[in-house]
Image (tube, rainbow, N blue to C red):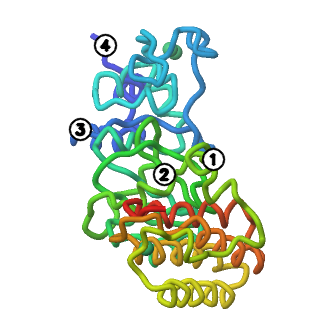
Amino acid sequence: MTHPTPLQRDHIESPRPALLCTALALAAKGVPVLPLRVGKVPFGNCPDCAHNACGGRPHMKTPGSCQCPAPCHGWAAATAAPDTLTSPVWSTSWREAGAVAYHPAGVGLTVVDLDDAAAIAWARLYLPATRTITTTRGEHWLYLGTMPSANAVRPGVDIKSRMAYARWLGPGTGTMTGLPDAVRALPVREEEATPPGSVASSHSASAVWERSVATGCRHTEGYVRTGVERGLALIGEHPESGAGTQAFSVACFLARQHAQCPGPCGLDALAEQVVNAAVAVGVPEPYARRAVVNGLNLHASAAA
Ligand SMILES: [Zn+2]
Ligand SMILES: [Zn+2]
Ligand SMILES: [Zn+2]
């Protein structure tokens, strides 16, 4: 007659790592999860998947037929299947993991990842309130709806939604609201930002709005000039730290003024003045330009 020794029983009933418990609780609600290493990045690919030799997972940008049982391919490994999460090969990763991540778009969400206090201050001014989660140095703002992910859309701001993972740091507080245009407009690709003859390629210190180019504008010359002068003055009052943000909001304001005009309103020239005003107080030009383009795009119905 033999009895299992305490050592054996410990081995058989070894408690699940706390992170795996968190992961299973999320998975039970349908949230696709994956383990992150201590450095908060996904585990590397196994030898079979190294350099995507397997072709990658079926739902990746370049879809392959990988059925690897290991948590390979970063966000694409995320799963809500408990059998996978507790499989021997995943269990090894959970024991070495430093955090749980989830795939935001997998549950219809977008995470605006605000890295620092300045990014949070910007979000409080320009983004609608929603559910927020405290991170190491900043906050995650969660919105309902998905979009392409993009890093560094502004200083200290990343967007994590489709084909991305975000750290799970708890449910947060506040009521989740719909993904706003203000977030959708943030990732402006370089080619979108620089169409020929647009704001971005017509840089010139002397560009000034003229009534003659605004043949489709329903406003008086005085109204337009007063609007832009007020905006430029605001940028001048916010040197360095806040001027880029101010340029963004001035561009929003100008685009809104002309949203009902049949156009063209000469917004290119107005935008150029805003960029120049921001650059003049120390905002790096690429940042100023993107802030202005993003601001104008928020009201893209306005005719340029
Ligand atoms: Zn693999
Ligand atoms: Zn693979
Ligand atoms: Zn107009």
How far apart in space, not on screen, are marks 4 and 1 (Cα)? 83 Å
- Residue where numbered disc 4 is placed: 2
Residue 202 vs residue 33: left or right? right
Q: Alpha-carbon distance for marks 4 and 2?
A: 58 Å
User: Disc 3 on helix, strand or loop?
Assistant: loop
Foreground mark, 1 or 3? 1
Please state if 205 lies on the left or on the right of 163 as rendered: right
Nearest to the eye among marks 4 and 3: give it. 3
Of 29 and 254, the residue lying toward us:
254
Within 10 angstroms of label 2, few (less than 14), some, or many (20 or more) residues?
A: many
Q: Residue at x 21, y 42 (%)?
A: 29
Q: Residues within 10 Å of mark 4 (few under 14, many from 20)?
A: few
Which amino acid, by three-letter code, is at mark 2? Answer: Ile
Quadrant where the N terminus lies?
top left
Name which residue lies at 28% across and 27% down. 81
Residue located at (60% from left, 88% from top):
229
* Labels 4 and 2: the sequence-earlier one: 4
Determine which residue is flagged by label 1.
Answer: 196
For marks 2 and 1, the one nearer the N-term is 2
- Whole-Å distance between the Cαs marked 2 and 1? 27 Å
261 over 240 or under it: above or below: above
* Residue under label 2: 159
Nearest to N terminus: mark 3 or mark 2: 3
The dot on residue 30 is: 3
Q: Secondary structure at mark 4?
A: loop
